[in-house]
Image (cartoon, helix red, strand yellow):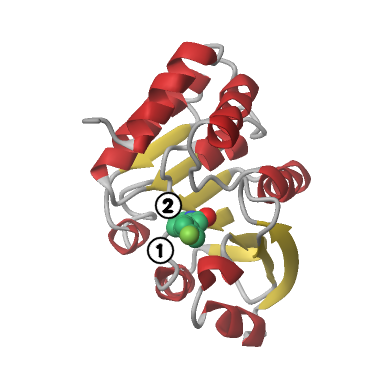
Amino acid sequence: KGTTREQRALKYLKEHARQGDPDSVLETFDEFCRTQEWAMNAAEEKGDILDEIVRELQPTTCLELGTYCGYSAVRIARNLSPSARLITIEVNPDYAAVAREVVKLAGLQDKIEVINLDSADVIRELKTKYDVTKLDLVFLDHWKYLYIRDIKLIEEEKLLKKGSVVFADNVIIPGAPGYLEYIRGSKNYKSTFYSVHFEYMDDMKDGVEKSVYIGDE
Ligand SMILES: Oc1cc(-c2ccc(F)cc2)cc2cccnc12
Ligand SMILES: [Mg+2]
């Protein structure tokens, strides 16, 4: 075929979504995943919970680990206030390239910064290089064994404050080994589990975990 699934998704979006309209980009991506090819977007029930968190929290500075094609980046950023921004990190260059196009298609390039690097390296430089003081929202959606590595790094960098929300996808499928017991066992978080359907699969269950930081600044 010569093209990747992600490139085919982007082509479909460019042909069917309304330029500058985030809702249209998301609806069109969901349609692509339901009718053409499945893709690992934090969509449907997962996306609804993410929307709820963003609307209630009204975060100023958001960090997403695992951009993939930018679906959840668009989903988050479409609900952000004018001065708020999202930094999203994607280690795979092919995914990052597609994500930048999707963000542009949605007209959200002024709110979303896609960084094609390893998450740990960026987290260590958020304060010095990316002008971040605190993170109001963190969305964990990259490789599952990295959740625990990166949340510990985020704590070490003192990037969370009382009320910051850490939202984790896939805590059931593929599962985030060690992360759940770490975050649920920590006195610094109040965690809630939501049983949800796996993206675009009505007969599969996954889970997401919302953790509110209550620790010291
Ligand atoms: O939401 C996700 C789903 C899957 C996934 C793919 C195929 C399966 F058979 C099962 C699970 C992988 C992810 C990797 C990174 C971020 N999110 C993912
Ligand atoms: Mg996921």
Image quadrant in which you'd find residue 65: bottom left
Task: Identify which amino acid the numbered label 1 is placed on.
Answer: Trp
Q: Position of residue 19 (x, y in %)?
A: 51, 12
- Tell me, yes or no, whether the two marked residues, 1 and 2, touch with CB atoms within 8 Å: yes
Q: Looking at the rendering, which quadrant does residue 76 occupy?
A: top right
Q: Is 168 displayed left or right of 192 in the figure? A: left
On screen, residue 192 above or below 99: below
Q: Pick whichever of labels 1 and 2 is earlier in the sequence.
A: 2
Instruction: Between residue 200 and residue 105, name the one nearer to us.
Output: 200
Residue 67, compared with residue 207, is above or below; it is: above
Question: Which residue is at 40% across, 70% downward?
Answer: 146
Spatial separation of the CA atoms under disc 1 and disc 2? 8 Å
Q: Is residue 177 visible?
A: yes
Residue at the location (50% across, 25% down)? Answer: 108
- Distance from mark 1 CB to nearest ligand 1 atom below 8 Å: yes
Determine which residue is flagged by label 1.
Answer: 143
Location of the N terminus by quadrant is: top left
Residue highlighted by disc 2:
66
Element class at badge 1:
loop
